[in-house]
Image: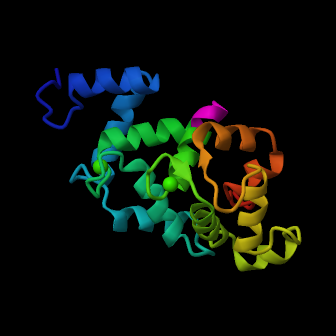
């Protein structure tokens, strides 16, 4: 019954996603239904993705952040997000496991994808994150975090590296885990969520 539905998620993909994300079959099927409803083409474009972020951050400029997040999720680098990439993204960002979130954060900061972070990459992502912060919240920020440059300097300081050195994934994760301030600087969550 109902097995004639052409839009169902394939067995192979279901199996693959169950293994790589630990989500249940029911959860994956539910997301697939939502995904195909909201995205009949089966692929999310960068423009659609930016629109989602614009809705989520109505009082700020989320465009460059959305572009970086999109890049970090588009693991096969074909310029769109398919259902598999979407579910893996959900898995990484919604997981309660901090190391998993930080692995994703590392890929977000690793703009050129070479497996290391440079100071300029940290500056670039800190600038994108800073643009997420609504202007009226900026005066309330600590004085060493109230510009994108200061935030990048502070964050870089947690890795104990020279400006010309680079940070490997393990060093990034250790540096963030050891400092609550660092954890705050690599993200921005709207405070007025409710
Ligand atoms: Ca893709
Ligand atoms: Ca890099």
Q: Nearer the viewer, residue 169 or 47?
A: 169
Q: How many marks?
A: 0
Residue 44 appears at what percent x and percent y? 31, 56
In screen coordinates, is 167 left or right of 150? left
The residue sitting at 73% across, 61% down in the picture is 192
Q: Is residue 83 above or below residue 189?
A: above
Q: Position of residue 184 (x, y in %)?
A: 75, 53
**Horizontal and vertical percent for residue 73?**
41, 48
Would you say 115 lies left or right of 134 here? left
Residue 149: within the magenta?
Answer: no
Above or below for 87 versus 184: above
Q: Is residue 194 visible?
A: no
Name the quarter where the C terminus is drawn. bottom right
Quadrant showing the N terminus = top left
Kindly tell me whether residue 157 is visible in this rendering. yes
138 vs 118: above or below: below
Closest to the observer, 112 or 41: 112
Residue beneath the point at 88% across and 67% down:
142
Q: Residue at x 75, y 60 (%)?
A: 191
**Relative to residue 120, is residue 45 drawn left or right?**
left
Name the colour scheme: rainbow
Q: Residue at x 37, y 33 (%)?
A: 30
- Magenta stretch: helix, strand or loop mostly: helix
* Magenta stretch, residue numbers: 97-101
Q: Position of residue 139 (x, y in %)?
A: 84, 77
Q: Residue 13 or 122: which is nearer the viewer?
A: 122
């Amino acid at each position: 019954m109902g097995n004639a539905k052409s839009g169902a998620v394939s067995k192979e993909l279901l199996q693959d996603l169950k293994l790589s994300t630990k989500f249940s079959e029911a959860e994956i099927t539910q997301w697939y239904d939502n995904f195909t409803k909201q995205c009949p083409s089966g692929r999310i474009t960068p423009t659609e993705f930016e629109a989602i972020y614009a809705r989520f951050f109505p009082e700020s400029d989320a465009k460059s952040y959305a572009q970086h997040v999109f890049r970090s999720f588009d693991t096969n680098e074909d310029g769109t997000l398919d259902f598999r990439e979407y579910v893996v993204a959900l898995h990484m960002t919604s997981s309660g496991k901090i190391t998993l979130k930080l692995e994703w954060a590392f890929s977000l900061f690793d703009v050129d994808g070479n497996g290391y972070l440079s100071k300029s990459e940290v500056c670039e992502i800190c600038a994108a994150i800073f643009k997420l912060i609504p202007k009226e919240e900026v005066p309330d920020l600590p004085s060493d975090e109230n510009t994108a440059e200061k935030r990048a300097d502070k964050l870089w300081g947690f890795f104990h590296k020279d400006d010309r050195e680079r940070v490997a994934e393990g060093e990034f994760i250790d540096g963030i885990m050891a400092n609550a301030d660092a954890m705050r600087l690599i993200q921005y969550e709207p405070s007025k969520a409710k």
